[in-house]
Amino acid sequence: MTNNRPPIRVLLADDHAIVRAGIRQFLEKVSDIQVIAEAGDGDMAKDMIQDRQPDVAVLDVQMPKSSGIEVTRWIRANFPKTGVLILTAFDDDPYVLAVLQAGANGYVLKTASPTELIQAVRDVNDGKSVLDAHLTQKLISQLNRAKEPTVVEPVTSRELEVLELVAKGYTNKAIGVQLGISDRTVQGHIAHIFAKLHAASRTEAVMRAVSMGWISQSVGSITEE
């Protein structure tokens, strides 16, 4: 991947040194990613993030001292511009939902290929939300089993058009160009979609729409604005 942008500055946090070494080796095979720091526990990760302010923090869920969930909440509260990619062996619904609710931008399993991991880091750095394909259907099923919300208000045809473009990873500006409307109008449609679907993010809105059969696009890289 060649461009004129500076390398994506990445922090790795995992309590297994050999795992960090493997991830680092994969990531640094490409010229646009640079691992600037490693941490063996959650507290160390916080210290290094505060000191180095990486573009993307790649975190495990279970770490000593502070979990990946706790570190994610801390990053969102203190360094909102830092992207958070969870890279873990855990695919249990409670872990996934808890991390996404804490504000993580992506969740990828350690079974992912090096190419998938590299692309996930790039997507998170670009402001997109990344979800391992293996987890998409599990999360949709979890949302279907949830007791709340009990009533979802139907979206309009225009809102459905917006939602379909959101699912394809379009930004507000790109959606506006595609539909011939202003960015502000797009933002208003998305706010209405969130309210109707009781969703807190674009990823959650798309998953709810997929689970109800409104759109067929599976969750991949969704730009969170």
Image (cartoon, rainbow, N blue to C red):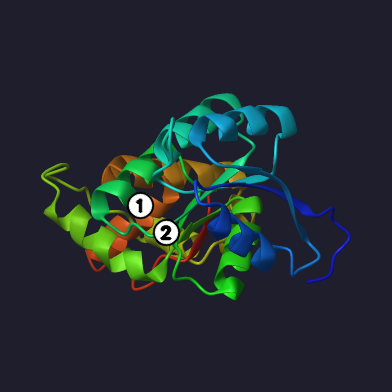
Element under label 2?
Answer: helix
- Please identify, in this view, whether the residue under mark 2 or under mark 1 is nearer the observer: 1
Residue at mark 2 to residue at mark 1: CA–CA distance: 8 Å
Is residue 214 visible from the viewing direction of this image? no
Q: Say left or right for 15 vs 155.
A: right
Residue at the extreme right of the image, as rendered: 4
- Image quadrant in which you'd find residue 78: top right
Residue at the extreme top of the image, as rendered: 78
Q: Say left or right for 208 vs 172.
A: left
Is residue 124 visible from the viewing direction of this image? yes
Residue 153, given in percent of the width and then of the height, sits at 21, 48
Q: Say left or right for 23 vs 70.
A: right
Residue 24, given in percent of the width and then of the height, sits at 66, 59
Residue 83, given in percent of the width and then of the height, sits at 59, 44
| Residue drawn 43% across the image and 36% down it | 64
Q: Three-letter amino acid code at disc 2?
A: Leu
For mark 1, what is the residue?
Answer: 205
Of the residues under marks 2 and 1, which one precedes in the sequence?
A: 2
Q: Three-letter amino acid code at disc 1?
A: Ala
Element under label 1?
Answer: helix
Q: Is residue 9 above or below residue 110?
A: above
Few, some or many C-alpha atoms within 10 Å of disc 1 (few <14, some 14-19, many ≥20)? many
Q: Give the quadrant of the N terminus.
A: bottom right
Q: Is residue 216 above or below residue 167?
A: below
Residue 95, given in percent of the width and then of the height, sits at 31, 48
Check if mark 2's residue and mark 1's residue have beta carbons within 8 Å.
yes
For mark 2, what is the residue?
Answer: 163
